[in-house]
Amino acid sequence: MAVKEKAVIMSSEKLSRSLRRIAHEIIERNSGTDNLVLIGIRSRGVPLATRLANHISQIEGQALPVGILDITLHRDDIDTFQEGKGTESKSHIPFSVEGRRVVLVDDVLYTGRTVRAALDALLDYGRPSEVQLAVLIDRGHREIPIRADYVGKNVPTSRAEVISVKVTEIDGQDRVTIEERVPD
């Protein structure tokens, strides 16, 4: 099945504005940045976490540690052991999460399965005192009772629709679109 672009729901400017707002919300909820770390869920959650850390650093004058979490080995919907795929993690968390407040960052919250896998993967690195979730887009349709603490934009969708998040670091542009699956 092919996909056809239906609408642009976030331009580069709106994406940047949403991340700045989320950065302020993170600072406010946590009363600053003490004991706080950001961890991006591979792949598009990583540049979003880095950008949030940069915004928070500009506001607070203090750099936040940023980690990368690969959830492949913890997915329940992907056969990770096909032909040698998924046998090693591509996570990079160069700090302890033990007793820290962790903000997991991802691009789209949909069924909740990615976040469930991320929580499992995160616990391989220690036991945080608290885990919060920041997402750029919340599109609904949960299969697992998970909700985001910080949301850039709520976008009600049908299951036939796809949210496509593009970030400069990976795709050469910042843009969020809603696409529709159409028969080939």
Image: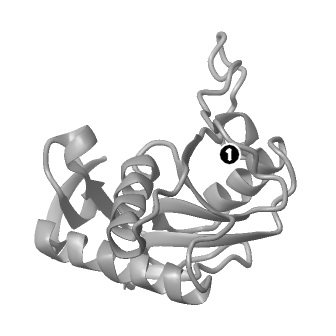
What's the amino acid at mark 1?
Asp
* Residue 122 percent coordinates (x, y): 75, 49
Image quarter of the C terminus: top left
- Dot 1: few (<14), some (14–19), or many (≥20) neighbours within 10 Å? few
Q: Secondary structure at mark 1?
A: loop
Q: Position of residue 54 (x, y in %)?
A: 35, 59
In the image, what residue occupies the spot 69% across and 65% down?
35
Q: Quadrant of residue 131?
A: bottom right
Q: Residue at x 22, y 70 (%)?
A: 16
Q: Which residue is mark 1?
A: 77
Nearer to us in this view, 79 or 96? 96
With respect to residue 52, does 66 lie above or below?
above
User: What residue is rendered at 34% in x and 63% in y?
Assistant: 162
The answer to whether residue 110 of the structure is visible from this angle is yes
Q: Position of residue 88 (x, y in %)?
A: 68, 20
Color scheme of the displayed model: one colour
Relative image position of residue 115 (x, y in whole percent): 65, 60
Residue in view at x 13 percent, y 50 percent: 173
Q: Nearer the viewer, residue 182 or 91?
A: 91
